[in-house]
Amino acid sequence: MKRLINWIRPSFEDNDGKASYRRITAFVFVCLICYMVIWNRIQTEIHLKAFFALLITLLLLIGIVTVQNILTFFHRDKEPSDDGIKSGDQVTIKKEE
């Protein structure tokens, strides 16, 4: 058991050897999510959405997650549109008379 604790402990420490509250808080939130999902504490979709909204708010407040991280997460499945002009495209300009 002591070997396991000595192996995990550096992941919760900063470069100066002191405990990092951000890393410990992130770990606690991951444990909370595992508990909520594994032991079926979230029973409907609305509970899940409310839980994630609360979790995102808490993570933003303590600075573990930034708004850019959240926007990247929600927009990662959208593919870029092909409507624009790309480099190397032939462009013809028609003059109206």
Image (cartoon, rainbow, N blue to C red):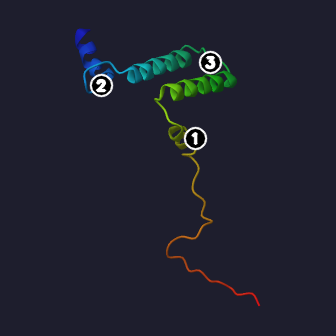
Can you identify the residue that label 3 sits on?
Answer: 42
Q: Residue 19 appears in which quarter of the rendering?
A: top left
Name the residue that disc number 2 marks: 14
Whole-number angstrom distance, CA of label 1 to CA of label 3? 21 Å
Helix, strand, or loop for circle 2?
loop
Residue 77 rendering spot, x and y as whole percentages: 56, 46
| The quarter of the displayed image where residue 24 is located | top left
> Along the line of sight, which residue is nearer the eye, 75 or 34?
75
SS category of the residue bearing label 3: loop
Q: Residues within 10 Å of mark 3 (few under 14, many from 20)?
A: some
Instruction: Report the residue at 33% width, 21% height from top.
Output: 12
Mark 3 belongs to which amino acid?
A: Ile
Residue 33 in percent (x, y) is at 52, 20
Q: Foreground residue, 93 or 6?
A: 93
Q: Earlier in the sequence, mark 1 or mark 3?
A: 3
Depth check, front residue: 9 or 97: 97
Classify mark 1: helix, strand or loop: helix
Q: How far apart are the alpha carbons under marks 2 and 1?
A: 30 Å
Q: Are marks 1 and 3 in contact (CB under 8 Å)?
A: no
Q: Nearer the viewer, mark 2 or mark 1?
A: 2
Q: Which residue is mark 1?
A: 74
In the displayed structure, 34 sits above or below 65; it is above
| Marks 2 and 1, the one that precedes in the sequence | 2
Mark 1 or 3: in front is: 1
Task: Name, please, the residue furthest toward the right.
Answer: 97
Residue 80's place in the image compared with 36, above or below, is below
Amino acid on which the number 1 mark rests in the picture: Phe
